[in-house]
Image (spheres, helix red, strand yellow):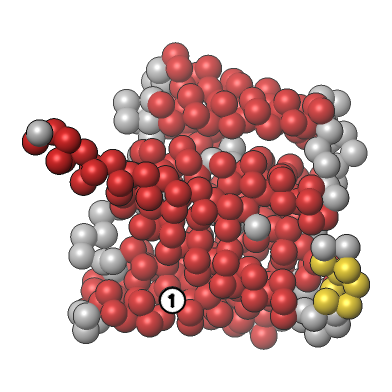
């Protein structure tokens, strides 16, 4: 009797957590397909990320202030971490990812970015000179083989080399974020970290753009979306801000709290599948059979690495991060 009474308390939150985590992954996966029309219309990656991060940060400002409960000293205590989060997770990862999808199919760019755990394994191997577990080595080899198939067995295939470089840079920033996420942030609500990081990243990008270090280009011309010409520019931007950023982060945070970061990080891998599916439906970007096989190897390799992450020398991410 007692066990049947306890079951709903344990099962329902995990089931709802799984639903929320899947919704978060789908929402994050939509950022590329909805942002790419703006990039093709003339928006620069810096402007796109500044608009996305700044507006989403404002959307999350109210729940962040509610979570703070007037404890503004927490922002000062964790200021360095918040700045690092804004510069790496928001500015670096997203700008490089959007720069990559200007030149590459979205699925390809995202698969290269999601090779970040492989970079961490190789870094730890080089730093400690100790071979990781056999499962981790197998996962690394699978992911590398998958990337070769995604990019092209001959080297670059028909893909833009600069786009590949941008995607690799996004993977490096994501790997740095994973290392940062191992830093304890006791007392700082996750929604506050996300909101503050988004605003820091947006402000930094605006300064960079205004000073002319990187192009800050915005066009208010209509875009092509869902095969329809003349769609107002603010429609895809609103989807990215409200759905692929604010909604995605909030559902991801709640889902991870209910599932645990380990299970949530595995569910987060479905973002790649959602991104590929949405790119196919919205933009007509269909991966080749070789790229699809490579994608399966990359995802399978990352899963193998995550299975051994608690035993590995590399600190593991506490939350999934999406572009």
Q: Residues within 10 Å of mark 1 (few under 14, many from 20)?
A: many
Q: Is residue 81 left or right of residue 85?
A: left
The answer to whether residue 242 is left or right of residue 234 is left
Tell me if I can see residue 105 in this picture. Answer: no
User: Can residue 190 be seen in the rendering of this structure?
Assistant: yes
Is 144 located above or below residue 320 in the figure?
A: above
- Locate residue 231 relative to residue 252 in the image: left or right: right
- Residue labelled with disc 1: 60
Who is closer to the viewer here, 227 or 59? 227
Tell me the SS state at disc 1. loop
Residue shown at the point (50%, 55%) measured from the top left: 24
- Give the quadrant of the N terminus: top left
Q: Residue furthest left?
A: 2
x then y, percent, for residue 272: 63, 43
The image shows residue 20, relative to residue 122, as above or below, that is below
- Pick the front one: 94 or 291: 291
Residue shown at the point (90%, 39%) measured from the top left: 158
Residue 135's place in the image compared with 158, above or below, is above
Q: Position of residue 91 (x, y in %)?
A: 57, 66
Q: Residue at x 50, y 45 (%)?
A: 268
Q: What's the residue at 48%, 82% (across, down)?
A: 58
Residue 143, given in percent of the width and then of the height, sits at 61, 27
């Amino acid at each position: 009797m007692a066990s049947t009474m306890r079951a709903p308390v344990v099962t329902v939150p995990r089931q709802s957590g799984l639903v929320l985590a899947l919704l978060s992954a789908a929402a994050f996966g939509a950022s590329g397909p909805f942002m790419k029309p703006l990039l093709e219309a003339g928006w620069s990656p810096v402007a796109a990320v500044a608009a996305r991060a700044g507006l989403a940060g404002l959307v999350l400002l109210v729940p962040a202030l509610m979570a703070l409960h007037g404890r503004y000293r927490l922002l000062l205590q964790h200021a360095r971490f918040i700045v690092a989060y804004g510069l790496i997770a928001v500015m670096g990862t997203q700008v490089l990812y959007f720069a990559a999808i200007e030149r590459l199919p979205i699925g390809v760019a995202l698969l290269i970015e999601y090779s970040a755990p492989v970079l961490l394994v190789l870094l730890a191997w080089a730093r400690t000179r100790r071979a990781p577990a056999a499962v981790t080595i197998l996962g690394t080899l699978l992911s590398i083989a998958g990337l070769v198939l995604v990019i092209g067995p001959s080297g670059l295939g028909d893909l833009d080399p600069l786009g590949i470089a941008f995607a690799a840079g996004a993977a490096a920033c994501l790997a740095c974020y994973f290392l940062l996420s191992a830093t304890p942030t006791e007392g700082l609500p996750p929604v506050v970290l996300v909101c503050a990081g988004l605003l820091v990243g947006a402000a930094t990008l605006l300064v960079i753009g205004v000073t002319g270090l990187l192009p800050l280009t915005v066009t208010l011309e209509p875009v092509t979306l869902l095969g329809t010409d003349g769609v107002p520019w603010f429609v895809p931007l609103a989807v990215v801000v409200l759905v692929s950023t604010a909604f995605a982060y909030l559902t991801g945070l709640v889902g991870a709290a209910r599932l645990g970061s380990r299970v949530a990080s595995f569910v987060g891998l479905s973002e790649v599948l959602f991104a590929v599916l949405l790119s196919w439906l919205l933009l007509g970007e269909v991966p080749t059979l070789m790229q699809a096989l490579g994608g399966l190897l990359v995802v399978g390799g990352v899963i193998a690495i995550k299975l051994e992450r608690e035993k590995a020398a590399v600190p593991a991410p506490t939350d999934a991060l999406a572009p």
